[in-house]
Image: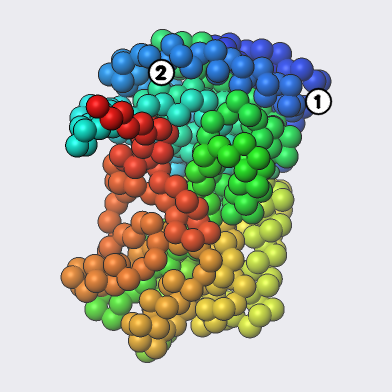
């Protein structure tokens, strides 16, 4: 597949490729080997104006399309994406280094699952309801600006696009400049699915230029952002000038809490998987493991055994479980945190800093585990977004809850233990999604952050409601 000629031609506006207004480009780099795999237009504010105008023009027609028809289009998009799943998986692996097995099993397939889940929700949703003498109606909010990250590139886009389309909104998407290639495939599937021109528009470019132009735009009614807390703050500030709705899905520092009645080998296996999957580049990763202090040594042994099975390798190798970081800049950032952990006195029990032997080329980091970590250490407080697990001992359960809740984040967590006991502890954690004993993902359940992990919810009914306005008509 020649990725370059497939993707280098322009923005996607009004149902087709529109040449960019400026000639500057952004290189998309394969992090496994540093090779440039595509050039994309570096969008400008003028490109954003064109995309917003197309979205605004398409809005009345799409908003007037019955929800069942909108849902049918989303289903056809899902079907078309499913047919192109292998191409999507290959693109994702090339642009951001996810192991091909993960790209196939999750990166390329979750977007299909998410689209279908939202289409299901359109049926039976209370588009209008009687409340006393009021008719309360749910209406599309208008033009949505969607700004997305590189870690699950297509999944993050679909988590916004599907509910926005079902709601009757039109969309201007700015995908991550690090992993933008699957957005074009998605756009092509919308044509096949019969989405009217202008309902989805894509402007490529940097966050500072294109992201801020979308966020500030007076004709954009809502920003739905997934990314770092730092950028979420900036977007809130830029969007405040027009008082648009801003839904933020931000960073996390998830804690996997192992209770003293947990099945330790099973809990460790599941918690380590949640720390290292996608190279730890997951907002909901359990990057902290909280363990009873009296059991720390025995748990560390199990963790080291489990970590050794997270094979580092080329992302195109089917046996690889941890590929490179998504970019060289990100590799350096993660490596810096490993150095910082050592400098702050945490006990390195697996992995370590520096380029792994045999991986001098490419953005590779060793899966790394620290034990006996102070809950206030930098590596226990800041989101690293890499394969770095910090084991933190706790003296008693109240302390475990305090540590779990003791960061600025509140996105995810896990509790491992006797089911009733674990559920009771899960209720005490201040985070938007908690898994008990490694329970699996539910695409109908709301996902989102407390505190600085964000202010919105994606997926499920709450994820659809975010994209709607509410009107009460009294009679
Ligand atoms: P990022 O914040 O650097 O970038 C995300 C997007 O914002 C990109 O498209 C980027 O171009 C854009 N952007 C950057 N600066 C901008 C600005 N000033 N104005 C507008 N847009 C701007 O995040 P990333 O490095 O791509 O992704 C990693 C982060 O995303 C992590 O913090 C992770 O936790 C978070 N994340 C959160 C969730 C969630 O659901 N809560 C899911 C995935 C990732």
Q: Nearer the viewer, mark 2 or mark 1?
A: 2
Find the residue positioned furthest to the right. 23
Q: Residue at x 62, y 40 (%)?
A: 239
353 to the left or right of 62: right
Q: Which mark is residue 63?
A: 2
Circle 1: element type = loop
Position of residue 135 measured from the top left corner of the image (x, y, whole percent): 25, 29
Q: Residue at x 38, y 49 (%)?
A: 447
44 to the left or right of 267: right
Tell me which corner region of the image, top left, top right, bottom left or bottom right, holds residue 4.
Answer: top right
* For residue 97, above or below residue 435: above
Q: Residue at x 25, y 32 (%)?
A: 134
475 to the left or right of 18: left
Is the N terminus in the top left, top right, bottom left or bottom right quadrant? top right
Tell me which corner region of the image, top left, top right, bottom left or bottom right, holds residue 376.
Answer: bottom right
Position of residue 410 measured from the top left corner of the image (x, y, whole percent): 45, 62
* For residue 234, above or below residue 81: below
Give the crowd class for mark 2: few <14, some 14-19, many >=20 residues within 10 Å: many
Find the residue positioned furthest to the front. 475
Position of residue 39 measured from the top left corner of the image (x, y, whole percent): 72, 26
Q: Is residue 250 visible?
A: yes
- Front residue (pair 399, 165): 165
Q: Is residue 387 visible?
A: no
The reply to whether the residue tagged 1 has its Cβ within 8 angstroms of ligand 1 is no
**Disc 2 versus disc 1: distance between alpha carbons?**
35 Å
Circle 2: element type = helix
The reply to whether the residue tagged 2 has its Cβ within 8 angstroms of ligand 1 is no
Q: Which mark is residue 24?
A: 1
Looking at the image, tell me whether mark 2 or mark 1 is earlier in sequence order.
Answer: 1
């Amino acid at each position: 597949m020649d990725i370059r000629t497939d993707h280098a031609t322009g923005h996607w506006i009004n149902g087709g490729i529109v040449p960019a207004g400026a000639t500057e480009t952004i290189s998309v780099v394969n992090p496994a080997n540093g090779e440039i795999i595509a050039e994309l237009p570096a969008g400008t504010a003028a490109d954003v104006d064109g995309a917003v105008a197309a979205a605004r023009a398409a809005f009345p027609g799409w908003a007037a399309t019955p929800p069942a028809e909108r849902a049918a289009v989303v289903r056809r998009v899902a079907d078309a994406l499913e047919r192109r799943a292998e191409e999507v998986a290959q693109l994702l692996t090339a642009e951001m280094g996810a192991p091909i097995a993960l790209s196939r099993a999750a990166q390329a397939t979750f977007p299909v699952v998410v689209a279908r889940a939202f289409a299901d929700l359109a049926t039976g949703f209370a588009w209008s309801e009687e409340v006393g003498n009021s008719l309360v109606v749910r209406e599309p909010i208008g033009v949505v600006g969607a700004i997305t990250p590189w870690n699950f590139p297509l999944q993050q886009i679909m988590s916004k696009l599907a509910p926005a389309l079902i709601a009757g909104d039109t969309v201007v998407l700015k995908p991550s400049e690090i992993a933008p290639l699957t957005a074009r495939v998605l756009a092509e599937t919308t044509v096949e699915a019969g989405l009217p021109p202008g309902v989805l528009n894509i402007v490529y470019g940097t966050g500072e230029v294109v992201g801020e132009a979308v966020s500030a735009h007076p004709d954009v009614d809502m920003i739905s952002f997934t990314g770092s807390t730092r950028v979420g703050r900036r977007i809130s500030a830029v969007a405040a000038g027009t008082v648009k709705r801003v839904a933020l899905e931000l960073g996390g520092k998830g804690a996997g809490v192992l209770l003293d009645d947990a099945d330790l080998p099973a809990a460790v296996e599941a918690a380590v998987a949640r720390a290292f999957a996608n190279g730890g580049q997951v907002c909901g990763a359990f990057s902290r493991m909280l363990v009873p202090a009296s059991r720390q040594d025995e748990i560390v042994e199990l963790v080291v055994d489990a970590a050794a099975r997270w094979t580092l390798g080329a992302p195109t190798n089917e046996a690889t479980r941890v590929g490179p970081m998504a970019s060289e800049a990100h590799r350096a950032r993660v490596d810096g945190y490993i150095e910082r952990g050592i400098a702050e006195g945490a006990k390195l029990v697996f992995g370590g800093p520096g380029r792994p032997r045999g991986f001098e080329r490419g953005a590779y980091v060793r899966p790394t585990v620290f034990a006996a970590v102070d809950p206030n250490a930098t590596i226990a407080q800041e989101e690293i977004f890499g394969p770095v697990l910090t084991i933190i001992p706790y003296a008693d359960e109240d302390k475990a809850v305090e540590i779990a809740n003791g960061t600025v984040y509140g996105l995810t967590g896990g509790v491992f233990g006797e089911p009733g006991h674990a559920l009771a502890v899960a209720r005490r954690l201040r985070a938007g999604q908690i898994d008990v004993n490694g329970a699996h993902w539910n695409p109908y359940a709301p996902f989102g952050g407390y505190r600085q992990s964000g202010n919105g919810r994606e997926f499920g009914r709450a994820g659809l409601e975010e994209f709607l306005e509410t009107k009460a008509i009294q009679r």
